[in-house]
Structure formats: C-alpha cells, structure tokens
Image (cartoon, rainbow, N blue to C red):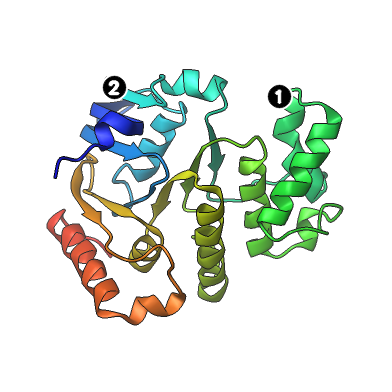
Amino acid sequence: MKDTRAAEAVIEAKGLDLVFQTGDGPVQALKDVNLAIGQGEFVSFIGPSGCGKTTLLRVIAALETPSAGRMTVNGMTPDEARRARAYGYVFQAAGLYPWRTIGGNVRLPLEIMGYPKSEQAERVKRVLELVDLAGFEKKFPWQLSGGMQQRASIARALAFDADILLMDEPFGALDEIVRDRLNEELLALWERTGKTIAFVTHSIPEAVYLSTRIVVMSPRPGRITDVIESPLPKERPLEIRDTPEFIEIAHRVREGLRAGHGYD
C-alpha cells in the first residue's frame, strides 16, 4: 500500500543537511534527512548522543537553519510556522521561572502573544486540568516535584492550543517510577487532544511504549537509518512492555542502533 504521509504531512524534511561552522572546521550534524510526519502521529527519535536528534527537532522549531534541503511545518517554513503558533516546545529541563507561580508560568506565552486576560485565565485553567495540575496554579515551581514541574512545562506548551507538540527528552532526568507515570499521562493526553507529537528520547522502552513510529538515527553525521512502524494498539497499559510484540519492536530498535555504529 502506498504511504500517503508525504501528501498529508504536517512536518516534512526533504534532503535536509545541517553543517555547523566551528573553530576546528565544519561539523556535519545532519545529512540527507527525509521524513514525513502525518497529522496525529506520535513519532519518537532515538539514537546515540550527538546523532542530531535534538538538532532535527530544533530545525522543525526554527531554532536552527538547515544548510541544504527543505523543512516544512503545516506547509510553511519553520519560521512561518513559529509566527503562526503552529507548535509548542517542551525542553529537557522544565525551564519554569522561579519567581512566577505555576499559573503565571503557564500564562506567560499567552501574555506575550497578547491574549485577553479573561481568555488567558480560561486557557490556563483548561491546560492545568489536562495535565492533572488543577489546584496548583498558585504554587511556585520549588513547591512541586520534578515530575509536576515537567507537567507544568507541558501545560505551558499546550496553552496556546498548537496542533503540534515538540518534546526534547522531557523525562530524561526523572526517576523510572515518575517517568513511567508521565509516559502513561502523556499517552492519555495525546489520545484526548489528537495532537501531532515529535519526541526525542535516549530510552528504547520509552520510544516503543509511546510511539506510532520510531525513527532510528546514526551517529554524526546524523542520518535516519530505520523507521519502525508500531503494531501496538493505541490503548497501552504499562504491562504491554512485557508482551512478545513489545519486546520484538524493542529488539528491532536495538539492532538498528547497533547497525548504526554503537549505542549504550
């Protein structure tokens, strides 16, 4: 069956290269990246450190400019998509301002974008409920656990209701128990909202558990070496990680990483 994602893509890379100029000479971070992500997909990028996962996410978000090739987001350039508020971005660290309350942190992009105060309040209330932080809007970041801070960061990215969510290892610094719970909550959030999610991770189980597709990347220069379709159902309890289907996908990801020259 023909893959129709390219025709329906909300994120599409064609022949994408990115070369950084450094004091020691040029460094090729991405090479000939071709990928189409369709509406409502959950796509994870996995690979060893320095393979260009975060760099590719930053190109989507107009935080880096490719040296060659093309990237489009909703048919626009990444910079046009940024100005159109097409996506929210969740960084590795929560990045909450300690002098602002949780509600104030979530409200910040809405203030910058000039939303009316009444709409700001309504949106903050709605997204805090989405991430199960209702009642915490008057707390300060230091009064919340690391996992709760990351949920507040996700709420901030959701506040202006972008259809695309870009997530750069948002749970990487959390312990396994908290990470499992947030993985479950993120899947539930994705199912409720139908957003398109591009997610960077170093964790094979996390990539397999969350994704509709897993993009395996090689060490520098960053290339896509495999794209793995997940046959897992949309409803995924944590126990699914013990099933033969899950283990088989994880094995294929691991083999893809090894074939791409090493992964720990």
Between 186 and 260, the residue placed more toward the observer is 186
Quarter placement of the C terminus: bottom left
Name which residue lies at 71% across and 24% down: 113
Q: Is residue 46 left or right of residue 61?
A: left
Q: Residue 159: x, y in percent? A: 67, 40
Q: Is residue 161 left or right of residue 118?
A: left
Residue 28 in view of the camera: no
Residue 70 circle label: 2
| Residue kind at label 1, given as amino acid type | Met
Q: Which residue is mark 1?
A: 113
Between 158 and 52, the residue placed more toward the observer is 158
Looking at the rendering, which quadrant does residue 99 occupy? top right
Secondary element at tag 2: strand
Name which residue lies at 80% across and 62% down: 143
Q: Residue 50: x, y in percent? A: 32, 46
Alpha carbons under labels 2 and 1: distance apart: 28 Å
Residue 208 in view of the camera: yes
